């Protein structure tokens, strides 16, 4: 049994962490007309298996598990999670304007969200790789939805979100390449 010399602490200060996003404004959150089919598509981006909800929870889980030992990395992961929270909020606004119900039930997804939607490896390089794969899947899904949605206002917001997701991949690859 380990002899306890004092409390085990986590000295990583997360105060002042800001969302990590491309430094470009978002288009106005507006739609051309109500369309619940479009809202249903966006619900998959909101809370489906590949979604902003999944991204947020995966990033938060990862940053919590690495928090005590890798503070600069944790601050970066939390900043990315905060950007995903903004994406979630933007999608909720669009869903509402399109006449959809902002809830946690994606009608055009592979069932309801569950923790099995997340990839939670134990070591940091695998965490970063899982995050890159999740961002890549999200971009692919956003592009499919842009092709299906004939509303330039909605698609402008989705394209702007994609820019953030591509930026996140660049940051995560850099972290991975630099031995994190």
Image: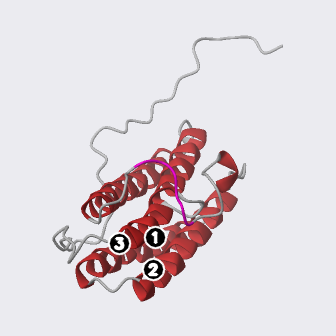
Q: Are marks 2 and 1 in contact (CB under 8 Å)?
A: yes
Vertical placement of 49 versus 165: above or below? above
In the image: residue 92, left or right of residue 143: left
Q: Nearer the viewer, mark 3 or mark 2?
A: 2
Range of residues picked out in magenta? 103-108
Q: Position of residue 71 (x, y in %)?
A: 47, 44
Q: Secondary structure at mark 3?
A: helix
Number of other residues with Cα within 10 Å of mark 2, as a class: few under 14, some 14 to 19, many 20 or more: some
Vertical placement of 177 versus 57: above or below? below
Q: Secondary structure at mark 2?
A: helix
Q: Position of residue 14 (x, y in %)?
A: 37, 39
Task: Specify the quadrant of the image occupied by residue 80.
Answer: bottom left
Asked if residue 75 shows in the view, the reply is yes
Quadrant location of the N terminus?
top right
Can you identify the residue that label 3 sits on? Answer: 161
Q: Which mark is residue 41?
A: 1
Number of other residues with Cα within 10 Å of mark 1, as a class: few under 14, some 14 to 19, many 20 or more: many
- Distance from Cα at disc 3 to Cα at disc 2: 12 Å
- Give the camera-side residue of 142 and 67: 142
Q: Which mark is residue 145?
A: 2
> What colour-coding does the image apply?
secondary structure
Q: Nearer the viewer, mark 1 or mark 3?
A: 1
């Amino acid at each position: 049994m380990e002899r306890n010399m004092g409390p085990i602490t986590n000295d990583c200060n997360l105060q002042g962490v800001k969302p990590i996003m491309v430094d470009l404004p978002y288009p106005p959150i507006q739609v051309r007309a109500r369309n619940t089919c479009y809202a249903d598509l966006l619900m998959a981006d909101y809370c489906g298996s590949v979604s902003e909800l999944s991204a947020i929870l995966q990033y938060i889980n990862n940053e919590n598990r690495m928090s005590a030992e890798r503070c600069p990395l944790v601050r970066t992961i939390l900043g990315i999670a905060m950007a995903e929270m903004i994406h979630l909020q933007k999608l909720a606004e669009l869903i509402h304007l399109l006449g959809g119900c902002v809830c946690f039930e994606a009608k055009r997804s592979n069932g309801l969200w569950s923790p099995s939607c997340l990839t939670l490896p134990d070591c940091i390089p695998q965490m970063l790789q899982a995050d890159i794969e999740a961002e890549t899947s999200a971009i692919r899904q956003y592009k499919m939805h842009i092709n299906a949605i004939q509303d330039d206002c909605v698609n402008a917001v989705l394209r702007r979100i994609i820019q953030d997701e591509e930026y996140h991949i660049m940051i995560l690859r850099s972290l991975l390449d630099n031995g994190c």
